[in-house]
Image: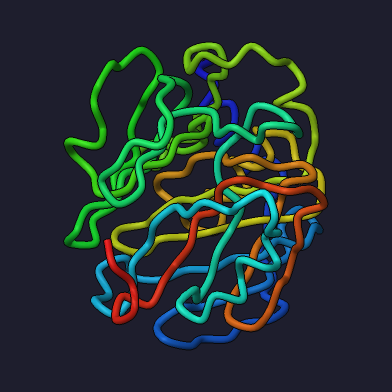
Amino acid sequence: MPKFLKLTYLIALMGLSTTQAFAQTFSGIQSEVLSLFGKTVNVISVDSRNPSIQIRPFLIPRDKTFRGATRDPKLLAAVNGCYFSDYVTFTPIGYLVIDGKRVSKRYLGSGIGFLPDGSVDFRSVFNEKTNFESIYNHFLTAGPRLIENGQLLVELRKEGFSDPHLDKPNRRTAVGKSGSIFYMVATMERFSLSEWAMALRQIGLDEAINLDGGSSTGIFCRDSLMLDPRSHIPVGLGIFSAEDTAG
């Protein structure tokens, strides 16, 4: 049985239900706390075509924390971003483009591309050999892909990942979309990748990519730091006020 069919079967078998514990909306951005598998999950959603916002990755200097970065008055919401090399150099791993400029280049995992009209593309990156800065203003890679065209999908080796620990239960962060609605999702609860994919599908995502997690897990929504990373992270993914943001 294909893996996505196994995962879909598990959802039906477990009778997964979603409980909303908290929700608020501002500037078109909705922040919710849901219960999935009996675990608390933080969800931020926004229409990516909203002309008053811009979604893009951003760098966090070594002398600044994720908490410090959230004090930027232009930043409305954010999660931690891509993987990085180590706790000394904090070099981003993967293909990263900010404001049309390539910051790092490695064809690994899957990526999210952001276009000027608010469109968001989810696509494979491993072995693709494409200059993404020629296509997207902003581009971020991580992985693996969790949902593709509504089907649950977790294929680590096909995306170039070889670390077996990546699939073990851990704190998780992900991004995804359903139509034009873009989602940022994070939890301090421990999910395997398959469980995480099922939880995201239950929320309603048709596309989703796993981001860095574990001690890097962080999520923020206007004046509320719901989850604070336990270590420095070099890259975040944010929803910014377009009125005050260049790029």
Q: Is residue 240 above or below residue 93?
A: below
Residue found 34% across the figure and 79% down from its top:
244
Q: Is residue 74 above or below residue 55?
A: below
Q: Is residue 3 above or below residue 199?
A: above
Number of on-image labels: 0
Residue 132 is situated, as x and y percent measured from the top left of the image, at 26, 33
Residue found 51% across the figure and 86% down from its top:
25
Residue found 50% across the figure and 78% down from its top:
30
Residue 133 is situated, as x and y percent measured from the top left of the image, at 24, 37
In this rendered view, identify the residue nearer to me: 103 or 21: 103
In this rendered view, identify the residue nearer to me: 91 or 236: 91
Give the image's coloring scheme. rainbow
In the figure, is residue 63 to the left or right of 159?
A: right
In the figure, is residue 239 to the left or right of 14?
A: left
Residue 43 is situated, as x and y percent measured from the top left of the image, at 59, 65
In this rendered view, identify the residue nearer to me: 193 or 118: 118
Q: Is residue 42 above or below residue 132?
A: below
In the figure, is residue 181 to the left or right of 192?
A: left
Name the quadrant containing residue 3. top right
* Residue found at the far front of this picture: 63
In the figure, is residue 38 to the left or right of 149?
A: right
Image quadrant occupied by the C terminus: bottom left
Residue found 76% across the figure and 54% down from its top:
229
Name the quadrant containing residue 111. top left
Residue 63 is situated, as x and y percent measured from the top left of the image, at 70, 55
